[in-house]
Each structure stands twice: as structure tokens, then as C-alpha cells.
Image: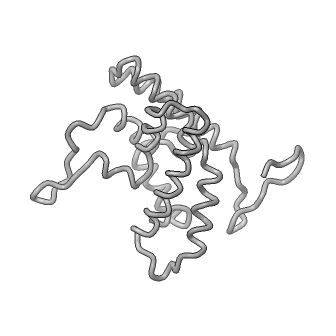
Amino acid sequence: KQTQRGEKPPQVEGGKKERWGDVAQHCLVEAAASLVLSDTLGLNATDKENFFKAALVHDAHKRPEIEAINSAKATLDHASATPEDFDKINDTAYEASKQFLLEKGVDPEVVRLTGAIAHTSIEQFVELDDKNQMMLREGVPLVDMAMHWLDDATKQTSVVTLAERMDYLVENQDRYPY
């Protein structure tokens, strides 16, 4: 719902204000940072452009995504819910987001790159070896790993250290229960 000038923003559970303008700022920060990171990593022009575009649109569908997640969580028995239950909810929301971007004419490669974010995407990058040690998967494009890292290192509208980002996640477990 769009708010009119002077109207109070809607409230979410717990009384926190929805701040959707922050989502746009978050995407702009990541887009600017993607240019610096692209140059630092030596990405080619195509990867740099796709990284920039993916950073700009990766949360374009965030509001409907959050509403879908909250609706699904409301029907979930939290006492018996597993991390896989939350992953399934998030995967369903991501598929809706992906479809939204494709319908808006976003390049399919840019849309694919937006799938490199969020906690469930880590399996795209790492695997366990025969000694149960985590290692990078072979053949994963550097731009995908850069997209994942950048979103993980961005706390709202600031690029922060991973330690700061992890502290934030721990402090906000109600928002990130998985």
C-alpha cells in the first residue's frame, strides 16, 4: 500500500515501521559498491554490468516477498518448524520475486545473479569434502560469489565487516529466525 504524504507508514508485528525507502537505498548502496568490487576483482565488462544491475534490482520485490513469507510463517507451527520449513518458504518467495523481475523485462542473467544472495544460496558456493570440511565448489563464477558476499556484507544501507553483520543478525533473531 502506498502511503500519502503526511500519512504514517504501516506498522508491522511488534510495532516496527515498514521502511521500504531503505530497501531502495540498500540496493543503491550495493550497486555502487558492486562497481568498486568489480574493479577490485578484475571482472570483465559483462560481469561488471550484470553485477551492477543485479545489485540494483535484487530486492525490487522485497515487500511482496516479506508479506508472502510472513503469511506462510503465520500458518507454521513454530514449535515444530525446522530450518528446512523456513528455507522452503524463502525459496517460494524467491521464485515469485524471480518471476516478477522476468515479467518486468529484466535480463535473465541478471535475474539468475540475484539468486546468489540470502542464506539459502550458500549451497551454490560451498560443499563438504570427504572429511566434512567446507570447501568452495569448483566452477562457480566469481561474480556470483561477489554478489553473495556483497549482500551479506551490507547491513541496511552500509557495507560493514562480516563480524558486524553477524552481530546484527544475532541481535535481530526475531527478524531472521533461521
Q: Is residue 122 left or right of residue 49?
A: left
Q: Residue at x 59, y 44 (%)?
A: 100
Q: Which residue lies furthest to the front in this view?
A: 103
Location of the C terminus (image quadrant): bottom left
Q: Which residue is drawn at 53% across and 56% down?
A: 93
Q: Which residue lies furthest to the right in this view?
A: 6
**Mark count:** 0
Q: Is residue 21 left or right of residue 143?
A: right
Q: Position of residue 137 (x, y in %)?
A: 22, 44
Q: Where is residue 168 in the image (x, y as percent from the top left)?
A: 50, 55
Q: Position of residue 85 (x, y in %)?
A: 44, 69
Q: Position of residue 79 (x, y in %)?
A: 48, 82
Q: Is residue 40 above or below residue 86?
A: above
Q: Residue at x 34, y 50 (%)?
A: 122
Q: Is residue 63 left or right of residue 167?
A: right
Which sits in the foreground, 57 or 102? 102
Q: Is residue 30 above or below residue 121?
A: above
Q: Which residue is drawn at 39% across and 24% down?
A: 47
Which sits in the foreground, 113 or 146? 113
**Quadrant of the rendered structure where residue 50 is?**
top left
Q: Residue furthest left?
A: 130
Q: In this view, does 44 lie above or below 52?
A: above
